[in-house]
Image (cartoon, rainbow, N blue to C red):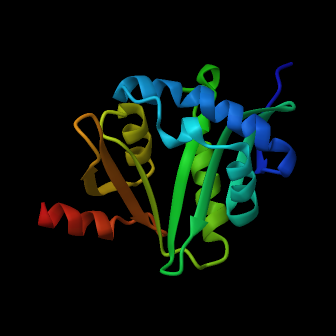
């Protein structure tokens, strides 16, 4: 009998596994954009521990192994910022990223403080863009970082309606 993947809040004991998984998962992004100095590859263990204390961090476990993770915070304006959604390469394309995205939305929305969800990814990250669109996100802005990278910010409101995205589309 196989094991089930479970999703739960991360603990201090998960920090090192999250860091190692993040390093593994962001190799493909670094290769895609030709930049191995991206923040997820240079982030310190101390910084991840600080995120555990200051925001919502979820992990997906297969037994004792952390195989996926996501982080989020809600700012004073009610925007829930979701970031660093990572899934171990051997676990990708099985719906785990979508499950984790839904779980962090539920966790961030549970207090009622979140009015909208927002995240970003690179313009060439087709799998990420597809996942986010399947979950109701739409592009609200782009920011050219350099010749290789344009960040695409996607958002949806807490009811899953894309009011902010509609405003962006109307202005484009």
Identify whether 70 is placed above or below 56.
above
Q: Quadrant of the N terminus?
A: top right
Residue 60: image quadrant is top right
Q: Measuring from the top left, give residue 137's x and y in whole percent.
A: 39, 54
In this view of the protein, which residue sits in the foreground, 130 or 31?
Answer: 31
**Residue 11 appears in the rendering:** yes
Q: Residue at x 31, y 69 (%)?
A: 164
Q: Residue at x 37, y 34 (%)?
A: 125
Q: Residue at x 70, y 65 (%)?
A: 54
In this view of the protein, which residue sits in the foreground, 79 or 91?
Answer: 79
> Tag count in the figure?
0
Identify whether 19 is placed above or below 133.
above
**Residue 5 appears in the rendering:** no
Answer with left or right where residue 168 lies relative to residue 103: left
Answer with left or right where residue 2 lies relative to residue 80: right
Q: Measuring from the top left, give residue 158's x and y in whole percent.
A: 49, 69
Identify whether 136 is placed above or below 6.
below
Q: Measuring from the top left, give residue 122's x and y in whole percent.
A: 35, 40
In this view of the protein, which residue sits in the foreground, 88 or 144?
Answer: 144
Q: Quadrant of the C terminus?
A: bottom left
Residue 107: image quadrant is bottom right
Q: Measuring from the top left, give residue 162's x and y in whole percent.
A: 34, 64
Q: Residue at x 47, y 24 (%)?
A: 28
């Amino acid at each position: 009998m196989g094991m089930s993947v479970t999703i739960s809040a991360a603990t201090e004991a998960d920090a090192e596994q999250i860091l190692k998984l993040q390093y593994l998962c962001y190799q493909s992004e670094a290769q895609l954009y030709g930049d191995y100095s991206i923040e997820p590859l240079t982030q310190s263990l101390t910084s991840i521990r600080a995120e555990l204390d200051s925001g919502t961090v979820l992990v997906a476990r297969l037994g004792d192994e952390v195989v996926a993770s996501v982080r989020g915070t809600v700012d004073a304006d009610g925007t829930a910022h979701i970031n660093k959604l990572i899934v171990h390469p051997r676990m990708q394309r099985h719906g785990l990223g979508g499950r984790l995205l839904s779980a962090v939305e539920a966790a961030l929305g549970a207090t009622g403080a979140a009015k909208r969800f927002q995240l970003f990814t690179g313009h060439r990250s087709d799998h990420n863009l597809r996942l986010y669109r399947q979950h109701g996100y739409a592009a609200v802005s782009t920011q050219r970082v350099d010749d290789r990278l344009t960040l695409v910010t996607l958002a949806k409101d807490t009811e899953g309606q894309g009011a902010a995205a509609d405003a962006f589309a109307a202005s484009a």
